[in-house]
Image (cartoon, rainbow, N blue to C red):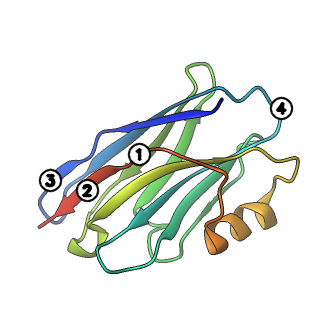
């Protein structure tokens, strides 16, 4: 079965950087979408970045100049590089996966909008002060 384990969260001052990692396993498909979703206290989940098996990426508009999603296929590790962090980035960040034949920009944008990934990690906290 699919397992997603995040790491790399922590506390950082505004303007700082963090890199989140997600060790992904259990999906033996040629096509898939992976993403990062965050949820701040009292707010709904928000898709921030996604990548598909072809390497296409999509971002939430408000973060695309500061966050970079990448996938090391050899190690099955998903990354989220976060630069110039702001207090409003404070949230629990979840790694998520969708095993689908539908990849590409439209699929990624739908996943970020609907946040209906099929598999989720346990989350890692990011606090920016």
Q: Position of residue 9 (x, y in %)?
A: 26, 46
Q: Are marks 4 and 1 in contact (CB under 8 Å)?
A: no
Q: Are marks 1 and 2 in contact (CB under 8 Å)?
A: no
Label located before the other in sequence (3 or 2): 3
Q: Are marks 4 and 2 in contact (CB under 8 Å)?
A: no
Q: Is residue 62 above or below residue 76?
A: below
Q: Position of residue 69 (x, y in %)?
A: 52, 49
Rendering quarter of residue 83: bottom left
Q: Say which quadrant the C terminus sits in.
A: bottom left
Q: CA distance from mark 4 to mark 2?
A: 31 Å
Residue holding disc 1: 122
x 65%, y 56%: residue: 117
Q: Are marks 3 and 4 in contact (CB under 8 Å)?
A: no
For disc 3, the neighbor class at 10 Å (few under 14, some 14 to 19, many from 20) is some
Q: CA distance from mark 4 to mark 1?
A: 25 Å
Residue holding disc 4: 30
Label located before the other in sequence (3 or 4): 3
- Secondary structure type for disc 4: loop
Q: Which mark is residue 11?
A: 3
Instruction: Name the mark nearer the viewer: 1 or 2.
Output: 1
Q: CA distance from mark 3 to mark 4?
A: 36 Å
């Amino acid at each position: 079965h699919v397992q997603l384990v995040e790491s790399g969260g922590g506390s950082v001052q505004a303007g700082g950087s963090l890199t989140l990692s997600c060790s992904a396993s259990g999906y033996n498909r040629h096509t898939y979408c992976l993403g990062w979703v965050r949820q701040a206290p009292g707010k709904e989940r928000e898709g921030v970045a996604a990548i598909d098996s072809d390497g296409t990426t999509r971002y939430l508009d408000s973060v695309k100049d500061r966050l970079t999603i990448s996938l090391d296929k050899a190690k099955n590790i998903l990354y989220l590089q976060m630069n110039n962090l702001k207090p409003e980035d404070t949230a629990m960040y979840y790694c998520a996966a969708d095993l689908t034949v539908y990849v590409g920009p439209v699929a990624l944008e739908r996943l970020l909008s609907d946040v209906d990934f099929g598999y989720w990690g346990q989350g890692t906290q990011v606090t920016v002060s």
